[in-house]
Image: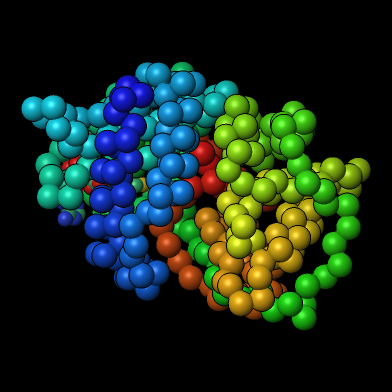
Amino acid sequence: MRPEDVAKAERLSDESYHDLDTRTPVGSWLEPAHRTAEHSRSWSRRTAHLLDTDPGGSWVAERDGAMLGFATSFTRELMWILASFAVRPGLQGEGIGRALMEPALHHGRGCLRGMLNASEDPKATRRYRAAGFTLHPQMFLRGTVDRSVLPVIEHVREGSAGDIDLMDSIDRRTRGAAHGSDHLVLIEGFRLLVTDRPAGSGYVYLRPDGSPVLLAATDRRTATTLSWEAFASSSPDQPVTLAHVTAANEWAVDVGMAARLDLHQRGYLAVRHMKPPAPYLPHGTLL
Ligand SMILES: CC(C)(COP(=O)(O)OP(=O)(O)OC[C@H]1O[C@@H](n2cnc3c(N)ncnc32)[C@H](O)[C@@H]1OP(=O)(O)O)[C@@H](O)C(=O)NCCC(=O)NCCS
């Protein structure tokens, strides 16, 4: 994949994921919607960043100049991550995905561990299992936060690029690899909250609606504190989502239920040669 392919890949992925959402029960519950212009911009920005750091990690399949599918992957320290993977609806199930996964996996050949956020598409899960990944079902919690139970939170502050060394060390401890320059992209797109105390450290990136998009902490108590601070920034009449929760992160089920969010299930965290990180809620594509 070259930088000039990013816009086409973005359109193709929106089409392919939207098509998948119309075919899965949880997708229809979430009311399938195409990406907003803002979401498309951030997808493209993130993918351009991955091409910058990992020019050999992303691949496209073409026929007569038309893009049929793509896979974007990257390595951070000794971890290989598949960020995004899609084949045009109507052309799926014919081996294009297999052909794309091969060079993407090859990009991670020097890595010890691997991680990706898998959809429920049976064609995707076949590919991941065939590549040796263990599939851990993911839960998510969604609802309007019960503001009467919000605790008083202390020692959480706004974060900045000055916190990257701290965040990288928490990343290594929880998921076994730092995010490095991915933090710069995340800081551009999301609000960052940090806590750093002798008893525990952690960080969370959140959306304007208060939904965490990536959370890492040295201990469950700190992870819980950060979630409450994120929930406190939600608005009283808008739902928040606590997503990508594996069973290894039961603290997240507990804090979500304490806030009176409802528990649901969607997709898998696929990992290779590692356990699901904890206390940790992975980002959808930068994990
Ligand atoms: C996931 C995806 C990229 C895979 O690409 P693809 O070209 O469909 O994949 P392939 O044809 O190479 O492989 C599909 C596998 O599923 C099997 N398959 C084909 N049709 C199937 C169906 N309807 N149900 C279940 N399995 C099916 C194929 O036999 C093949 O398995 P095999 O190699 O063991 O025989 C593509 O299906 C897609 O874009 N899905 C929607 C978006 C998505 O979920 N992306 C993944 C995000 S994590």
So how many labels did they put on this image?
A: 0
Seen as rendered, the residue at the extreme front is 37
Q: Can residue 282 be seen from the camera position used here?
A: yes
Seen as rendered, the residue at the extreme right is 198
Left-right relation of 114 to 250: left
Give 166 or 144, whichever is nearer the viewer: 144
Give 278 or 283, whichever is nearer the viewer: 283
Q: Quadrant of residue 262?
A: bottom right
> Percent position (x, y) of residue 7?
32, 35
What residue is rendered at 82% in x and 70% in y?
151
Seen as rendered, the residue at the extreme left is 64
What residue is rendered at 31% in x and 25% in y?
4
> Percent position (x, y) of residue 261?
60, 75
Q: Is residue 225 above or below residue 16?
A: below
Question: In what quadrant of the picture does the N terminus appear?
Answer: top left
What residue is rendered at 88% in x and 58% in y?
154
What residue is rendered at 29% in x and 28% in y?
5
Left-right relation of 114 to 258: left
> Percent position (x, y) of residue 273?
50, 35
Q: Quadrant of residue 63?
A: top left
Q: Can residue 280 be seen from the camera position used here?
A: no
> Percent position (x, y) of residue 38?
46, 49
